[in-house]
Image (tube, rainbow, N blue to C red):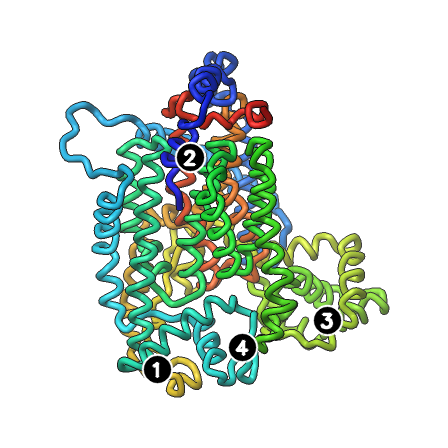
Amino acid sequence: MSDASAQESDVEGESGDHADAERLENSPHLRTASQHPRTASRRPRCYRRYGLMALCVVLGFAAVEANAIKTMDTLKLPVSSFGHIALVAFLAFAAMLLGERVMRWLNAPDGEGASFRLGFAGGWKPWLALTAIILACWAPYVIYLYPGVMWYDTSNQLLQWNNLPNLFTSGQLTDHHPVLDTAVFGMFVDLGNRIGSGDLGIFLYSIVQSAVAAGVFAHSLQFMHGIHASHRMTMASLIFICLFPIFPMYSITMVKDSLFLPLMLAFFMQSISIVRTRGVALKSPLGLAAFLLCALAIALTKKTGLYVVVLTAIVLLFAAGARFRWRIALVALAVAATMMALLPKAVFPAAGIAPGGKQEMLTIPIQQSARVLRDHGASLDPQRRKALECVVPMSSAKRYVTTIADPVKGYVWDPHKDACLSGFMQAWLLEFFDHPGTYVAAFAGLEYDWLALPPLVSANEGGQSELRLLPVYAQGTDHAFFEGHDRIGLSYSGAEHGKNVEDAVNAIENIPGIRLVFSRAIWTTWMAAFICYECLRRRRADGWLRLAAVSPFLISFLLLWVSPTSETIEAMRYAAPQIMMVPLALAVVAAWEHEPAGNQAAGEDGKHDER
């Protein structure tokens, strides 16, 4: 988690940097949109925003179609929907323009008459103060939800840690969930049992995890200050982190994502530093080690972390100078080798750890095959149908649910299916050309909540008041909701306080007039679209660099589209990293407009790197 300013000071100390800094003052890659000679006179107006208009029409069309797949299990577009599309497109257009104005206001320098200013400069004392402020705002959640919240996935991990029967095995430890997460949770519960009860261990975890997350968020605020975000923008981010319930509720609970979230934020900051310095941030052994540790940590704590590392590294290769590309490639290769060879081929077999099931990687093909079998099974080519049913038996296909894949794919993998996996994949690919609409509908059904807006009038649709919003899960304060809890030192703790928190958050999010503020689609798809658009608007200046800097945020968003569901509370765990990275991503989009070009690293020019 090295600060960008620290990396810059390391660069500025090298010989020849003053001459390079003068040269970089005139570099077209580092000029802001207002400074660039080709864009200064072309500042877009509302009536010139053809690209934005097209983007908003796409968002409107996608929202209406996503609503159709949920309510009617079809993607057909009736003529009556065009008015709805136009309404959502207009709403998106207004939201984007409003977002630009809010960003401009937030990143404006404070007036000279500003009185008390909370400091965001680097150093351990400001960091400690910021951490304390965040913890003070989160503490009521930790205390009220005593003895801590745990999720269903965590219960299975704890059973495995104690060699007890669980959803996945008869007691064997498995890599279905990251083993590192399982070990951390298990050790905390073991510690709790030594000093009183396993419940106390979960509460201790809540305290420690909230402190870790608060510390990383505090550092991210200092980082924002280091990349020249205004005091107003940084202060708004602090308030957002302290008061938006998503931050504490998905940072303090015992679930694998709580470990992943602060590590992902740290990796995000490392990536931004690499782009801003064009790779010079990796020059020192400490900078390289920090990037490697952050990359390895997110891969070890979440399955999709490996994909984030590899795809981000590919982007960074284009943003870094030639001297430093091999270091980025080295980190990506080291993480990939660890996760794809060292652990599954050597460490796990030696430790008796079973591999995770293939059904998780095949979620989309399995769901699409089930829908094809359900809708067109009688007319399928017999050989293809046999190949599909080898992995997706008709009994499983009959359990098809539009919005969630678990009823079809199940939770464990039958090893006997390995023999017909190649034939299944071939049949699945060929069926796409015969039934493309069915495949698209199956995919859209799983991911519709990343696109569909919440109902604007009714606060309750289909009996689900939290539909398409940002609900929290807190009833895991009852540690006796699964069989075997008593054998690992857990007991009934009551879920009343947790339910009160859930109901309070749902009530706030369902207030008429502000429901859209808590829309899941807006915080995922619309926010990603807004950030991409704002970067590409500056493509003649340094927009491509900004886009590269926010690549972990955008890649994390793209990985939402392989989720086994977007509707349930489980989907909120997938979306939480997106929401928590938003302040830093917006700072990257806005803050570089106020950064003097001479402060950029001397290594930003590829020719200088090769010199």
Q: Position of residue 203 (x, y in %)?
A: 29, 71
Q: Is residue 103 left or right of residue 17?
A: left
Q: Position of residue 305 (x, y in %)?
A: 53, 55
Secondary structure of residue under mark 3: helix
**Amino acid type of disc 2?**
Val
The residue that mark 4 highlights is 173
The answer for how far apart the CA atoms under marks 4 and 3 are is: 25 Å
The answer for how far apart the CA atoms under marks 4 and 2 are is: 41 Å
Q: Earlier in the sequence, mark 4 or mark 3?
A: 4
Q: Residue at x 56, y 31 (%)?
A: 321
Which of the two residues, 595 or 543, is positioned nearer the viewer here? 595
The residue that mark 1 highlights is 490
Q: Residue at x 53, y 52 (%)?
A: 67
- Of badges 2 and 3, nearer the viewer stands 2
Secondary structure of residue under mark 2: helix
Instruction: Using the image, determine if residue 189 lies above or below residue 324.
Output: below
The answer for how far apart the CA atoms under marks 1 and 2 are is: 44 Å
Q: Is residue 211 left or right of residue 339?
A: left
Find out whether the residues at labels 4 and 3 contact each other: C-beta distance under 8 Å.
no
Q: Residues within 10 Å of mark 4 (few under 14, many from 20)?
A: many
Instruction: Using the image, determine if residue 384 lies above or below residue 35.
Output: below
The answer for how far apart the CA atoms under marks 3 and 1 are is: 38 Å
**Amino acid type of disc 3?**
Val
The residue that mark 3 highlights is 391
Q: Earlier in the sequence, mark 3 or mark 1?
A: 3
